[in-house]
Image: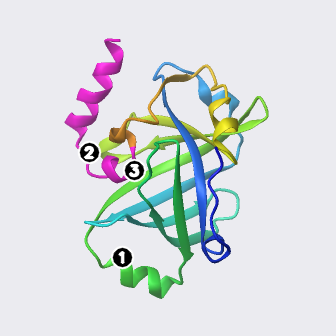
Amino acid sequence: MTVTLDLEETKYSRIEYERRFLVSPQANWKRDVESYWKIFEDKYLRDTRLRLRVLTDSDTGRRVLKLNKKFDSPSPWFRKVSRILLSPTEYDLLDGLEGDRLRKTRYYHNYLGRVFSIDVFEGELDGLVLCETEADELEELMSAEPPVYAKREVTDDPFFDGGNLCRTTRAELIRKLSTFERL
């Protein structure tokens, strides 16, 4: 299934096709990743679908500031996303709004010709590791074979959406992860 956007929407928006997996805590995924990584510092603005993001590259230290919006979707596997690059002044202005923060380090693994991003969360979410992959179309996405360290697909579980994780307490995370250990 391919979702199309009109010309005006494609300037700032795209359809994101994405799958997300819980990584086994016992997995040795670190040996498979590239030496390159990024720090993601997110702030989900309260009562909105907006996210402020600072991306910092490990190799150059370059920082990218942006504002994102993820739209509602009938499917957990695709949604429209929009972004705007921000100046430091614009970022600081928006950062003054109420929101909930999330920080993670993203590593990259090329597996069977596809890039899997491995996110290692910090703070209240310490110990949570997710991996995800994207594609240009839904059929391509659904045919992706995840690496062996991907314990369980959680794409359709809203608990693992960034907008929820930023408000998740340590106790809630431990309770949720324990349900997977029992299965």
Marked residue nearer the N-terminal end (3 or 2): 3
Residue type, numbered disc 2: Thr
Residue at which label 3 appears: 162
Residue type, numbered disc 1: Asp
- Reply above or below: 145 against 86: above
Q: Secondary structure at mark 1?
A: helix
Residue at which label 2 appears: 168
**Furthest residue to the top?**
183
Give the distance between the C-alpha atoms of the residues marked 3 and 2, in whole angstroms: 10 Å
Give the distance between the C-alpha atoms of the residues marked 3 and 1, in whole angstroms: 17 Å
- Reply above or below: 156 against 161: above
Residue 175 is inside the magenta segment: yes
**Furthest residue to the left?**
171
Residue 24 is inside the magenta segment: no
Q: Secondary structure at mark 3?
A: helix
Q: Secondary structure at mark 2?
A: loop
The magenta-colored residue range is: 161-183
Task: Determine the image quadrant of residue 179.
Answer: top left
Residue 177 percent coordinates (x, y): 32, 26
Numbered mark located on residue 95 in the image = 1
